[in-house]
Amino acid sequence: MNSINRRSVLLAGLGAAGAGALAACTNGSGSSGKALISPSASAVAAKEKKRKGTGRQEKVTLTAAPAMIDLGGGVMPKTWAFDGRTPGKEIRLSVGDTLVAELSNQLPNKTTTSIHWHGIAMRNDMDGVPPVTQSAVRAGSTFTYRFITDHPGTFFFHPHVGVQLDRGLYAPLIVEDPKETLDYDDEWVVLLDDWVDGVTGTPDEVFAELRQGMGGMGHDMGDSSSPSSSGMEGHDMGDMGGMDMGSDAPSPSASSGGMSKFMLMGAESELLGGDAGDVKYPYHLINGRVATDPDVYTGKPGKKVRLRIINAGGDTAYRVALGGHKLTITHTDGFPVQHQEVDALLVGMGERYDVLVTLGDGVFPLVSVAEGKSANGFALVRTSSGSAPKPTVRPKELKGMIMSVSQLRAADDVRLKSAKTDVTHQIKLTGSMDKYNWAINGRPFDMKDPGSNPILIQEGQRVRLDFVNDTDMWHPMHLHGHTYQIGDSGPRKDTAIVLPKKKLSVFFDADNPGQWMLHCHNAYHGEAGMMANVAYQA
């Protein structure tokens, strides 16, 4: 019997020197009373020995330190970055290679940090999640991550401490397949980000304001459970209308009334089911450049290019289109799908899409509209001489066909084998902007006791997770250490959008023992508590 139910697809809509001393609560039972497999357990090492490795090593050093970076257009914010640049230098290796990455923490004010290798199904003690899988790396010290990359794809890496994700500490990680079957002439990594740090404030200041909730902002919000329907005028942007503003001028949101520095009121998107986001960002970047001074890809007409699109943002989904071109989706979150031609993509935080495009003759805008936020990122594809379009351009493709995740299909060779579901967990997404009390199953994650309230699984099980979004906001839900399949034949992903008041059912095989975070990849929702520990029982 195939336990994966087709109705769950229809409900999907659109679809965070060794291991160090682990926090005591992750070894053994924590306060849950259940014996959990710790990240340093023999089962974790045994799984790593089964991974097929090439024996080759890719050694890198990543120094996290304060930096003044150049975003173009005279924008030079102070932030934290790896080796003085944002995005950090791309890491590229082949399937089966071992990555040996030494993190040197040179951050100020005794700030701890870590690196999470987003999307990689690796050994648990290298996942980079303090206090669950390692102790946080103290300022002035180092930590070496060492793991086999056993699956090809488009990935990235970022910290997993506080809201450091929303600074400049991120970079692409590309794992190439020596048996690659895709036919293309070149590739371009396209990294999307929403930027606040060093311009209007820091992510910590943003979070401090958001934590007050709308109830503490002095706004008359009407029904507090539905901030997006508060009757405030001037923010119906779901149809892309009125988006004539570039991303080059930090300015208060017109709908905020100037009453809050960081909180964005009235960001609306039909694609996202209503409220699109929480945070006002002065800039939206493509490959670390502002729209008025964009990154440029130079190619030749008729050449086929693979775009590896990564959303490293903290609070923004992007609608992405290349003017004058169709996009052929080939992969999402590193796994192949049956090819689908679309006009544009919707990419949530933490998601990655690989697309093929055959270049036309001219100068074309690559636009990443900040969904519902009346701003955009901008880059150029140039194949001949000619004047560039303005950064405020809105290619018609943005209003064209966008496939929902539930309409995509996994490629045959990566589809999960039919199997009986052994355990089903309801993952209820709870909270509101009013109190900013985001949580899973009504319980915010407790960093002081990460072993409490675990979502228990056992090695060898087929696991079903039913995401039930009880909130008025969308949430990109990311599972560490695994990829799940959406429905019985949907794509394999590690991050998927769960729309407000909707249910999304996903399935995965429990084949990577340890303790793994499941969380909203909105940096501020996750830090507020929308996070849980998917823990293997000993």
Image (spheres, rainbow, N blue to C red):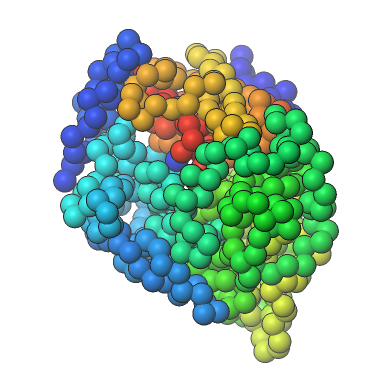
Say if residue 417 shows up in the picture.
Answer: no
Judge left or right: residue 12 versus residue 23. right
Q: In this view, does 508 lie above or below 326?
A: above
The picture places residue 432, in percent across and down from the top left corner, at: 62, 32
The picture places residue 233, in percent across and down from the top left corner, at: 82, 49
Question: Which residue is painted at 59% across and 63% down in the image?
Answer: 282
Q: Quadrant of the N terminus?
A: top right
State how many labels appear: 0
Q: Which one is nearer the viewer's eye here, 171 or 269?
A: 269
Judge left or right: residue 69 versus residue 73. left
The picture places residue 152, in percent across and down from the top left corner, at: 44, 50
The picture places residue 142, in percent across and down from the top left corner, at: 19, 52
Q: In this view, does 124 lie above or below 92?
A: above
Q: Which one is nearer the viewer's eye here, 535 or 151?
A: 535
Q: Which image quarter: residue 498?
A: top right
Q: Is residue 520 above or below residue 323?
A: above
Question: Which residue is painted at 52% across and 80% down in the image?
Answer: 74
Question: Which residue is painted at 39% across and 26% down in the image?
Answer: 446
